[in-house]
Amino acid sequence: MIHPSYSELIQAINTNSEEDDNTIMLNSRYSLVLATSKRARQIIGGSEPMVEGAAGKKPLSIAIDEFYKGKVKIVPKAPEEEEELITAAEESVEITEEAAEETAEESETAEESAAAETTEEA
C-alpha cells in the first residue's frame, strides 16, 4: 500500500493550512493531484527539494513527501495575475472586433468593385 494514503495526505495538508491564513484547504483528490503534480514539475524544472533523503526518488514522490511534512503549502494565485488574464482576454476581443470591422470593409469594397465591373460590362 502507498504511504501516505490520499486521505492521510489531504488531512496533513489541511492541518498545516489551518495554521496559515494564506493557504488553501484541499477538499478533493483532484485538488491533491493538481497540487502534487505542479510541485513535481517545479522539481523537474530545477527547484531544490525541501525534504531530506530526496536523492534517488522520483519528483512526484518528493512532492508528496514535501506536502505531507508541511514543507510546501498551497497558495492561491495573486489577483494581479487574474487581472492580467482578464486584460489579455479583453485585448483579444478588441482585436477580434477590429479584424471583423476590417473584414466587413474589405467585403464592402469587393462588392462595390464587383458591382462596378458589372455596370461597365453592361
Image (tube, grey):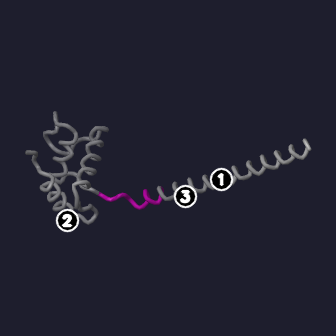
Instruction: Tell me where the magenta segment starts and ends, as one range.
Output: 75-84
Cα–Cα span, label 3 and label 2: 37 Å
The residue that appears at 57% across and 56% down in the rendered structure is 93
Q: Nearer the viewer, residue 117 or 10?
A: 117
Mark whose residue sits in front, 3 or 2: 3
**Residue 30 location, quadrant:** bottom left
- Residue sitting at the far left: 1
* Mark 2 element type: helix
Whether residue 115 appears in magenta in the rendering, the answer is: no
Q: Nearer the viewer, residue 65 or 112?
A: 112
Name the residue beneath numbered marker 1: 100
Tell me the tag on residue 90: 3
**Amino acid type, callout 1:** Ala
Percent across and percent down for residue 113 are 83, 46
Q: Tell me: 122 left or right of 86.
A: right
* Mark 1 element type: helix
* Mark 3 element type: helix
